[in-house]
Image (spheres, rainbow, N blue to C red):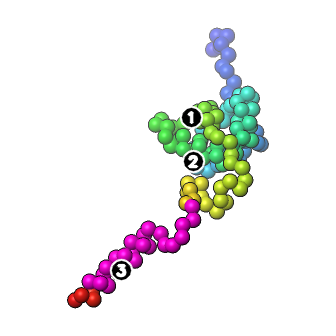
Amino acid sequence: MNEGVRDAPARVAVVPDFARPVVDRISAAEVYPAWTLTPAEWLIVHALIKRSGADMLATAAVQAALRARGGVSHARYFLRTWQALPPAPQPGTAPATAPGNVLPFPDRPGPGRVARSADYLAQALAAMEAQQ
């Protein structure tokens, strides 16, 4: 029986084309929030994609979802995290071959610390064997 109270229509998530790469990457990481954002929020997401890039937004969203104790039920949860991100680096500022979590060290002449240690131990062992 209807007593004059209307049920609010259920909102269907319509993801704009510009946001599809971000949504797909987040979904591929098995994070499934509701994407029923308002037009104003989608405008913010579009600006953030242009500023920071789809990869950075998706990575930050997945990391935030992993930190959330109760999980993430709505994509609105990511907006504050995304707004705190820096702009994407200019092309050529980071080596293209290094993964995102590796910082290159300046070039040093000679072998690294582990190789020097192995050489030192090999020399010490050879000296001990020569004494026997």
Label 3 CA crowd tier, 10 Å (few <14, some 14–19, many 20+): few
Q: Secondary structure at mark 1?
A: loop
Out of 129 and 71, give the one closest to the viewer.
129
The picture places residue 125, in percent across and down from the top left corner, at 30, 81
Please report the residue visible at 26 percent of the width from the left and 83 percent of the height from the top: 128
Of 45 and 90, which appears nearest the observer?
90
Q: Is residue 52 visible?
A: yes
* Residue 62 vertical position relative to residue 105 in the rendered view, above or below: above
Q: In the rendered image, which quarter contains the C terminus?
A: bottom left
Count numbered badges in the picture: 3
Residue farthest along the left direction in this orientation: 132
* Amino acid type indicated by mark 2: Glu
Residue 20, quarter of the rendered image: top right
Residue linked to disc 2: 30
Report the residue at 31% width, 79% height from top: 124
Q: Tell me the residue that label 3 is attached to.
A: 122
Give the residue type that dot 1 points to. Ser
Callout 3 secondary element: helix
Q: Depth check: 114 or 81 in front?
A: 114
